[in-house]
Amino acid sequence: MKQGVIFRLLSLLLGIIGLTMIIPLIMAAFYGEMAMVRGFVMALSGPLIIALPVLISTRKSPFRLSPAGGLLLVFFVWVFTCLMGGLPFFISGYIPRFSDAVFESVSGFTTTGATILLDVEAMPRSLLFWRAMTHWLGGMGIVVLTVALLPLLGAGGFQLVKAEAPGPETEKLTPKITATAKILWLLYISLTGIQTLLLMAGGMDWFDAVIHAFSTLATGGFSSRNNSIAAYHSPWIDWVCIIFMALAGFNFSLIWGLLRGKYQDLMKDSEAKAYGGIILVSTGIVTLVLCTGGDSLEQSLRCAFFQVLSILTTTGFTLTDQNCWPPLAQGVLFFLMFVGGCSGSTAGGIKVIRHVVLFKQAGNEMKKLLYPKGICTIRLNKMVGRKDVVYGVAGFVFLYMALMFAATFLVSAANMDLFSALNVGALTLGNIGLGLGASSSASVLYGLPAYVKWGLSFIMIAGRLELWTALVFFSRDYWQR
């Protein structure tokens, strides 16, 4: 019974992803890119053929799924979506190796932004559009989109969203999770539209503007240019991307609250204050370092803001070659790779709130040395934090570092130097896509053996699903349950 429910839901979710391919399919037909037409038709046909009868037969009956079944479903959805998303790259012949095509698809859906394409500008427009769409769909979440579109998921929708959403806790904006999902997607679409218009006002054509808006709001980093944002030489475009990267890395629930006039929520939110502080301090240090190197104040400030937010929010855009920066500035960026954006955002990484929790708990441990009989608790958002949250955060961070080092060993087995291998581990697990050293080069990632790319693909999915959803299946308790 459980397997039947999982299969039906999986069919519906993959059918929705198949429907999204119709947009780049129309573009491919319009531009006469027949290889891409064939790729999209073959990729979307199977899921749509399977999903249509399932939707008709279950349109009035809500699905009932246990929490354990929900975890399995979300993991399967992401795995099969990434496999399906790689088919247009592979079938069209523009990425001839299947491992490379899947790697590019996984990097897209997980909003990592690491690429194996050596010449992005040589790719067909429809393929680049689909590549950016994978960012946009994966940024807010495939399951969140499905919950917004399919009310028949019922109360079980919250369990699915919880398994996919970033951060230690999932917040409802309304009593019904379906309404919450719709609000989040409405906000997401609105911000994407606004940024697209602002980028066009800065000189981008509609195609580049849409692609970079998709990548920015999803904190992904795929670009239609080989040199990313640096190719446009436009301070206006740089500052637009800076603003929207900051918004994309911020908690969308708080953004919705601010739009409704709930300014007090921002003032008491511990994570929001820490997020702002990290941005300002990091940008200040990098700006001072760049200024001493001879750059103007405006250029130093703009480059510092851009690269700090690109790494912190795990977007991965580039404005300059950060490998040429002084060691202190590179050190700041390396530190930010282990921070990440806010919970409830589209950003990856450990998340700011987890660092806040651990920092406060470290202070508590020092207080206990001075007051052994005292009762010490952490406070989050001016309220007493729960112990189970602290334990959950500690377990997550340990598992995160262990998995990152496992990825480092995997990449170093392919004869990459240790520092670059560590960067590849950090940028794939944190869904950052941009690192330091050799890891920032597409040619290096392209040259990795197939087994390394398959391993890194799993690492990227695990990072996007906040580890637990991808790793719980390795637990004996899960299968006994």
Image (cartoon, grey):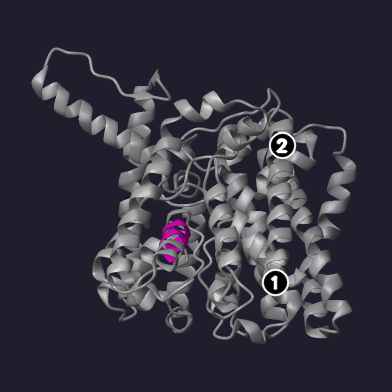
Is 424 above or below relative to 34? above
Residue 53: x percent and y percent? Answer: 88, 50
Q: Main secondary structure of the magenta part?
A: helix
Whether 305 is among the magenta residues is yes
Labels 2 and 1: the sequence-earlier one = 2
Mark 2 residue crowding within 10 angstroms, few (<14) / some (14–19) / many (20+): some
Name which residue type carries label 1.
Gly
Mark 1 residue crowding within 10 angstroms, few (<14) / some (14–19) / many (20+): some
Q: Which residues are magenta?
A: 303-310
Mark 2 element type: helix
Is 149 above or below relative to 442? above
What's the residue at 83%, 65% (across, down)? 22
Whether 336 is among the magenta residues is no
What's the residue at 71%, 53% (across, down)? 194
Name which residue type carries label 2.
Ile
> The N terminus appears in which quarter of the rendering?
top right
Residue 392: x percent and y percent? Answer: 37, 34
Asked whether residue 46 is in view, the answer is: yes
Q: What's the mark number on residue 203? A: 1
